[in-house]
Amino acid sequence: MIRRPIGNSRPLNAIGLGCMGISFAYGPAMEDADAVSLLHQALDLGVDHYDTAEMYGFGDSEQKIGKAFHDRREQVFIATKFGPVYNRETGQRAGVDGSEKNARRAIEQSLNFLQTDHIDLWYLHRRDFTRPIEETVGAMADIVKEGKVRQIGLSEVTAETLRAAAKVHPIAAVQSEFSIFTRFVEEGGILEACRELGTTLVAYSPLGRGMLAGWSKDWKADGWDFRATMAPRFQGEALANNLALVEEIARVASDLNATAGQVALAWVLQRADNIVTIPGTTKVANLKQNLDAADVTLTPGAIAKLDGLAAKVEGERYDETGMKGVNG
Ligand code: ATR
């Protein structure tokens, strides 16, 4: 197991658990009892960092985590997020609200759903472009002073936004998509700014939303799936192109006696020691496989092969609306 702190936290398992998929995005929500069982087994296997958000199933993911961990709160580091707002009747997204009023509403709801009196890491999920970042981070910092939140994070922000925010309050973490296929945090100076500021990069979708775990060429969505509807790189010719690249990862993996998914996770963790990652899964077998990635060491030759793939990926990671919310 690799242990790394997030901001000034105690050292945590660098492979945490992303808890979006238990409620939303890649299929129907898990039954509560199944999710609680998965979360308990994850804790037994040494996972101590759980990442959720108000948005994931509109509170369902937070509630599942609350049910699993309310009686073992001190063993887990819980991260959640606020910002995007939605119409409660239709479930439709209605922009991002980084106001103090919304921050205060959201924190009370998250504490309630998570059945706790504090959040270990509280992120702004997406930047509110209608107000300065300093205003939102200032509101979050007041909530830290009140003891409801231990540390603050930002998600999908630019290096410039991170630097401005860090002048108001220490930023423990930036959470952005980062994987063999998605490397803008390196190109945009974000990883470098994190290093300078003592900020941990929390890499989400390290398995490329599942694809890098070695999907076959005939992958198809089963029912409503975020990937097939809202992510161009999972559609049409782009998908075929990208799945051919996944075969390269599988070849590297087979040389190392590992799985493609393990190689994808090892690649993320070996980029820098201020990175942790949060692959998501609904299955204990996949979780175990992901945790074993900590024991996979990539050779320089393997890294060189993997480093060449991102430039060949086709299709954006979000649709046009989604892309407007990132690089905030
Ligand atoms: P996200 O951050 O959005 O959760 P991710 O971690 O890159 O994205 O990938 C999550 C996807 O990878 C899920 O569809 C998950 O499916 P299961 O719930 O069926 O596991 C899939 N996944 C996770 N670990 C996997 C593994 N070891 N083998 C195959 N698929 C895996």
Image (spheres, rainbow, N blue to C red):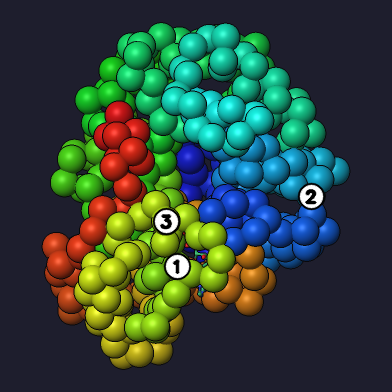
Between 262 and 241, the one nearer to me in the picture: 241
Vertical relation: 292 (above or below) 105 = below
Is residue 172 found left or right of 103 in the rendered image?
left
Q: Which residue is mark 3?
A: 229
Q: Residues within 10 Å of mark 2 (few under 14, many from 20)?
A: many
Amino acid type assigned to the residue bearing label 1 in the image: Gly
Q: Earlier in the sequence, mark 3 or mark 1?
A: 1
Is residue 232 among what the camera can see?
A: yes
Looking at the image, is mark 3 or mark 1 nearer the viewer?
3
Amino acid type assigned to the residue bearing label 2 in the image: Ala
Q: Residue at x 45, y 10 (%)?
A: 138
Mark 2 lies on a secondary structure that is helix
Q: Residue at x 25, y 45 (%)?
A: 185
Disc 1 CB within 8 Å of nearest ligand 1 atom: yes
The image shows residue 273 at horizontal and vertical percentages of: 35, 52
Q: Earlier in the sequence, mark 2 or mark 3?
A: 2
The image shows residue 150 at horizontal and vertical percentages of: 59, 26
Looking at the image, is mark 1 or mark 2 nearer the viewer?
1
Q: Residues within 10 Å of mark 1 (few under 14, many from 20)?
A: some
Numbered badge on residue 68 = 2
Q: CA distance from mark 3 to mark 1?
A: 15 Å
Is residue 303 among what the camera can see?
A: no
Is residue 173 found left or right of 39 in the rendered image?
left
Q: Which residue is mark 1?
A: 210
Between 176 and 34, the one nearer to me in the picture: 34
